[in-house]
Amino acid sequence: MSRISRNISIILRAERLIAQRQLAVAAKRTGFYAAAGLAVGLAVIMLNVAGFFWLSETMSKSLAAVIVAGVNLVLAVLLALVANSMTAESDTSAAVELRDMALHDIEEEVTDSLAEARNTIVGLRRDPIGMLSPDIISSLLGILLRYARRRKNNPDQ
């Protein structure tokens, strides 16, 4: 049973490490989304004005506005793609492997315990007295030893 409790402890620690790393990546990803939003806001304000004035000197004002807006959208899409490409898998692969090993070890321990229980039941069916006699003898010896110690410590009884 100590292997099972150790493995459960390992699983819980690994899951906590995985969750912490995924939370850190989510925080970074949120930062990139915020940066993308800020960049879009700044791009809308600054580049739109500057680009519009620069392009309006060589072409119509409506075409200049469309070009400036398209550049802003491309920048926003690139920043969003960078944020989506971040993943926690490379950082958590060791913890995932450790968790999987602990789960596999628990499965083996449970399988071994079930096999041992089946063998005991089969032995009880074949020879119940032979299977139980070592347990009965050890229990009786334990009771007799406790009784003898009590008698030795309290001779009045």
Image (cartoon, rainbow, N blue to C red):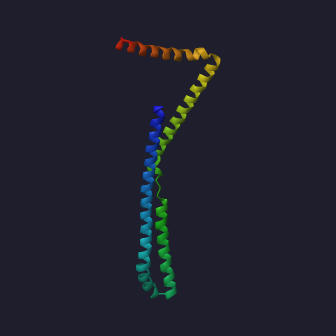
Confirm whether residue 94 shows in the render. no
Q: Position of residue 15 (x, y in %)?
A: 46, 46
Q: Position of residue 46 (x, y in %)?
A: 40, 79
Nearest the camera: 133 or 152?
152
Q: Residue furthest right?
A: 126
Residue at the image point whose x is 53% and y is 16% from the top: 136
Nearest the camera: 25 or 6?
6
Q: Is residue 30 left or right of residue 123?
A: left
Confirm whether residue 122 shows in the render. yes
Q: Quadrant of residue 142?
A: top left
52 up-or-down from 106: above or below? below
Residue at the image point whose x is 45% and y is 58% from the top: 26
Count the labels in the image: 0
39 up-or-down from 48: above or below? above
Q: Position of residue 82 (x, y in %)?
A: 46, 63
62 up-or-down from 138: above or below? below
Quarter placement of the C terminus? top left
Q: Position of residue 55 (x, y in %)?
A: 46, 84
